[in-house]
Amino acid sequence: MLHGSVDLLPAPQGRRRVTAEARAALEVWLRVLDLLLVPSAALLGHLLCHGWIPASHSQRVVFGAVLLCCVVCFAVAPVYRNWRARSLLAELWTLFLAWTAAFALFSMYSVLMDVADGVPAPWLVSWYALGLAGMGVSRLCIRLRVHNLRSRGLDRQRVLLVGLRAPALKVHRLLHSRPEMGKEVIGYFAGPDDIATRRDGGGAPLRLGALEDLEPYLDQHRGQVEQIWVSLPLGGRARLKQVLKLLERYPVQVRLVPDTTGLGALNPGVHQVGDVPMIGVRQGMVEPHLLMVKRVEDMVVAGVALVVLSPLLALLALGVKLSSPGPVLFRQRRHGLDGKEFKMLKFRSMRVHEESSGALTQATRGDARITPFGAFLRRTSLDELPQFLNVLGGSMSVVGPRPHAVQHNNQYERLIERYMHRHYVKPGITGWAQVNGLRGETPELRSMKKRVQYDIDYIRRWSPLFDLRIISLTVFKVLGQRMAY
């Protein structure tokens, strides 16, 4: 027996056609506005800096070079890909990174080609600021237009669920909290293996009936459902085939929502090799544009940090040299991305000593091996600053799970479930666990387990804005805290 109806949300005739046209128009307008705003910002910047004086030959060369860099960076970064599914802040952050990368790429070109002296810096700064502001405002206006269309029902896809497993319920709640994504779950048909929901709904979609009610419902509401998501257990192959066979009668997009609960999944995703689809159960950031965004972020932050902190680095290096005989930098074997070994750099904080073969003694409070200056470095986390060189070299990231010594990894991977999931991304100078107070000595196994939980949570939640939040928290929480000896 049917318990609900999409008649509660009537769909006007031709709605799908209007939706497709609206989407296409918005996609085109976004690119056209950028195409107009970038040179307009350059012209306005020239007027502000030089008045009505015609542009010089060098300015025209710079204009062409920056435009070329902009085309390259906007093509590599996901500026236009899936922008509708992102929040406004995430979209503006992606735009900021791509626009900054374009000017950074041009700066590198001007230095390598020895033309930096002829580049008018005030004009470039004005162009950068005006272009970023203009493109940001244009995106805000387009977002307002999208909300207006969706409030009129012109850009919202109606989704019907078949079965209700945990991932489908999670997606429904996400769509309910993020109407700007343009999808709405109008209800579900219950299967025998559905998860339990509260009687008051508890954030669950409307129950429309059982599986046997699906066919009459679709016959009655042809053209009013645009997507059907099948959320049945992976083990129920016979029932899944029966449902998919039934849906062959209807020209509706059908998607499977696999339930990977209990499989130790980490960032699961769908891939295709040739014509063979695959479900990635455990992975880090495998999308090329995400890796590019993360790498650009690392290069910018590490490069700026090394330039700004260079006087401090020189003073700290001198302090290490005067504190005790030995090298300024300490190199230690650590496991990085994919479990590969690399040499992590730190300012030496201990007197030179030898460990027994295959052993590594973790620093403790009052450790006699630590020099007085080394204790200051470790307490303030300043001994970690040389790792910005690791970031530029590509073996580390600014933000990520902290790398542990090889000996500790070999010990904990047998004791802690999913411990090695930390190595699906590059290790970081700071991390989500560190800003939550989990750093320094780990005398108890539960302390390391909690650190690993935060590291895995970071991999699942990663975004450029999340990295920026962690970097900000590092300055206020980690530097100067007294948990490291």
Image (spheres, helix red, strand yellow):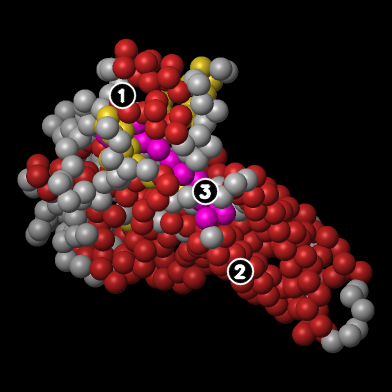
Q: Give the residue number, with chain letter if any, for mark 1.
A: 212
Range shown magenta: 153-165
Name the residue located 66 percent from the left edge and 72 percent from the top edge. Answer: 134
- Tag 1–tag 2 contact (CB < 8 Å): no
**Is residue 76 highlighted in magenta?**
no
Q: Nearer the viewer, residue 460 or 82?
A: 82
- Extreme residue in the left direction: 444
- Residue 84: image x %, image y %? 54, 53
- Tag 3–tag 2 contact (CB < 8 Å): no
> SS at mark 3?
loop
Query: Is tag 3's residue or tag 2's residue first in the polypeptide sequence?
Result: 3
Q: Quadrant of residue 262?
A: top left
Query: Is tag 1's residue or tag 3's residue first in the polypeptide sequence?
Result: 3
Q: Give the residue number, with chain letter if any, for mark 3.
A: 11
* Camera sees residue 337: no
Query: From the image, which quarter does the N terminus lie in?
Result: top left
Instruction: Tell me the amino acid under the disc marked 2.
Output: Cys
Q: Of circles 1 and 2, which is in front?
A: 1
Q: Give the residue number, with chain letter if any, for mark 2.
A: 141
